[in-house]
Image (cartoon, grey):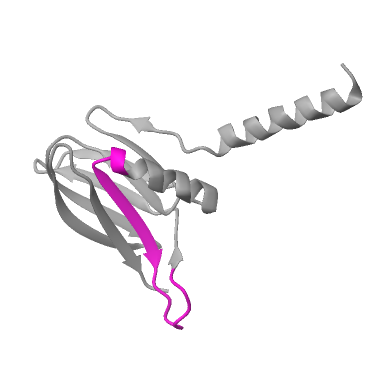
Amino acid sequence: MGKRSASFFIGLLLSHMTYAIASPVEYKTEHASYISGGVGSDEAAEMRSMAPRYALEIVSIVKSKSGQRDQYTSDFRIQVKDRKDTILIDALSEGPIFLANLPKGSYQIAATQNGITQSQKISVQQGTHRRIIFVWPD
């Protein structure tokens, strides 16, 4: 193999390794599955394209006081509880987009960012997609 072929092959291999490392990973619990990410434009586009396949989409945004553009934020904790107060998901989101598949039912979603906790109640129907947004102070 010549130097040019070897360089091309190594470059191709590294580009695929980088993509594999950067792709979000889906986690599974007994009653749910989830994935988080969306850091960077490529990963955000990938997460948005995956969203319709999940029952729940959670987005986290920091609202700008200065009138500048709002910013997406990551590293927020998500906890999903069912009607019986059983925790189905307790995870740290690795990006501003958190996607989850849950069984049909009603849930309490709590998100915590910088010591502030917000919660929303939702119901999930089979074959539907729900999107909720948590907005945090600047």
Which residue reaches farthest top? 1
Instruction: Give the side of residue 2 with respect to residue 129, left or right.
Output: right
Of residues 110 and 48, which is closer to you in this image?
A: 48
Q: Position of residue 134 (x, y in %)?
A: 31, 62
- At a point 9% along the width and 40% down the height, the residue shown is 84
* Placement of 4 over or under 106, stated as above or below: above
Query: Which residues make up the magenta segment?
Result: 52-70
Which residue reaches farthest right? 3
- At a point 21% along the width and 37% down the height, the residue shown is 102
Q: Is residue 54 magenta?
A: yes
* Placement of 111 over or under 137, stated as above or below: above
Instruction: Give the side of residue 73 with respect to residue 107, left or right.
Output: right
Q: Is residue 51 magenta?
A: no
Quadrant in the picture for residue 96 = bottom left
Q: Position of residue 99 (x, y in %)?
A: 33, 44
Q: Position of residue 83 (x, y in %)?
A: 9, 43
Of residues 83 and 19, which is closer to you in this image?
A: 19
Number of numbered labels in the structure image = 0
Quadrant in the picture for residue 64 = bottom left
Of residues 15 and 114, which is closer to you in this image?
A: 15
Q: Quadrant of the C terminus?
A: bottom left
- At a point 46% along the width and 44% down the height, the residue shown is 46
Q: Position of residue 121 (x, y in %)?
A: 15, 54
Of residues 49 and 38, which is closer to you in this image?
A: 49
Which residue reaches farthest bottom? 66
Q: Quadrant of the N terminus?
A: top right
Quadrant in the picture for residue 53 = top left
Instruction: Give the side of residue 57 with respect to residue 71, left or right.
Output: left
Instruction: Give the side of residue 70 with respect to residue 135, left or right.
Output: right
